[in-house]
Amino acid sequence: MPHKELDVSTDVSGTVLYMSIELSINMTGNKVPFEYRMDHDMESLFLEFLHIVRFTPGPTGNPGEDILVMPNEIRISQWHHDTLVANIPHVKGSDILRLHDPDKMASVLPKYWSPLAPNVIKLINIIYPQVTIPLCTGKNISKLFKQELNNILAECHKLEDTPHRYGT
């Protein structure tokens, strides 16, 4: 059942990996009423985008060389495969806070996506305007989010374009 803007509920649905941190806490068993906002959907889009730029090498990359998950980077992969749902909001939040650091962000993005590192950090700042534990989605972020996506699109036009045959 789709949520209505500004519904207050304890029920959540969706893919846990890409679910808003704030909302996914209700999947840990600690159901707390929350106000559903479109901002939570934008956070989900951001989490999908983060997954793409972190775990795909782009059309010119080599997954074996570009997608490096070092032993000290367990958190970035943990929220993609943890079987204990209660852990996911916490490790996801910790990871996003870690990626807020420009050096850390640059060190984990594959070569193809590395020019977008500053944009990804800007999206983190838009989605999570205040550092809180747990991270909470900002309010009324749609205009800034859309502007930054347009900036990212402009940056993507500068990336090397290579023909590829996905799905063939």
Image: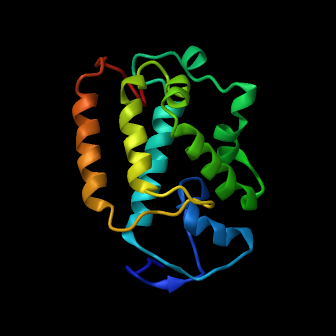
In this picture, residue 58 sits left or right of residue 76: left
Instruction: Look at the picture and state if 23 lies above or below 96.
Output: below
Q: Splitting the image into 4 quarters, where does residue 78 fall? A: top right
- For the point 65% across and 72% down, the residue is 26
- For the point 52% across and 61% down, the residue is 20
Q: Position of residue 9 (x, y in %)?
A: 54, 84
Image quarter hosting the C terminus: top left
Instruction: Look at the picture and state if 3 lies above or below 25.
Output: below
Q: Position of residue 97 (x, y in %)?
A: 57, 45
- For the point 74% across and 56% down, the residue is 87
Q: Splitting the image into 4 quarters, where does residue 165 fall? A: top left
Instruction: Look at the picture and state if 25 lies above or below 121.
Output: below
Instruction: Look at the picture and state if 24 lies above or below 67.
Output: below
The front one of 93 and 158 is 93
Q: Splitting the image into 4 quarters, where does residue 69 fall? A: top right
Q: Position of residue 4 (x, y in %)?
A: 39, 81
- For the point 23% across and 27% down, the residue is 157
Q: Position of residue 61 (x, y in %)?
A: 46, 17
The front one of 99 and 8 is 99
- Numbered marks: total: 0
